[in-house]
Image (cartoon, rainbow, N blue to C red):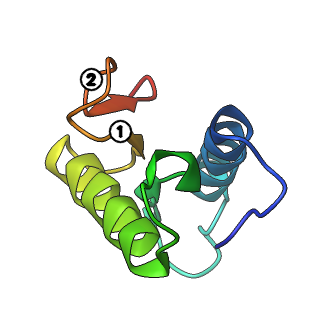
Amino acid sequence: MLLSSSDLNAAFAFAERLRTSIETTDLSRFATDFRVTVSIGVASSKFQLRNSQEFLFKAADKALYKAKELGRNNTVIYRPPNTANPESITAAV
């Protein structure tokens, strides 16, 4: 999903709302104890040194795999290792 008019914090907030909405959706009419969760990777074009869609997709993909590595059902923001920020931050699990 591309959010062209959102900054990184707004994109993260949107992703978190989406994640919690999916997590709390009642799917019991389909099966007993049926539950769906989602992991989301968020990336921003502000970190790229060149205009590259490939960079943006790879960054979001790295954040997604980090979210899964953390136990799934997470939202993670990609931050390049060369910034003052840690590589990623996660929402409260």
Disc 2 target residue? 86
Picture disc at residue 79: 1
Element type at mark 2: loop
Q: Which of marks 2 and 1 precedes in the sequence?
A: 1
Report the amino acid beneath label 2.
Answer: Pro
Query: Which image quadrant is residue 80 in?
Result: top left
Query: Which image quadrant is residue 90 in?
Result: top left
In the rendered image, residue 36, in percent from the top left (x then y), is placed at: 47, 65
Is 75 on the left-hand or right-hand side of 59?
right
- What residue appears at the point 44 percent right and 55 percent down from the top-left corner? 48
Query: Which image quadrant is residue 17 in?
Result: top right
Front residue of 9/84: it is 84
Is 88 on the left-hand or right-hand side of 53?
left
Structural distance between the alpha carbons of marks 1 and 2: 7 Å
User: In the rendered image of this protein, does residue 52 appear above or below residue 74?
Assistant: below
In the rendered image, residue 22, in percent from the top left (x then y), is placed at: 62, 58
Report the amino acid beneath label 1.
Answer: Arg
Pick the quarter of the image with the C terminus. Answer: top left
Element type at mark 1: loop
- What residue appears at the point 43 percent right and 22 percent down from the top-left corner? 92
- What residue appears at the point 46 percent right and 75 percent down from the top-left corner? 52
Front residue of 79/48: it is 48
Is 49 on the left-hand or right-hand side of 16?
left
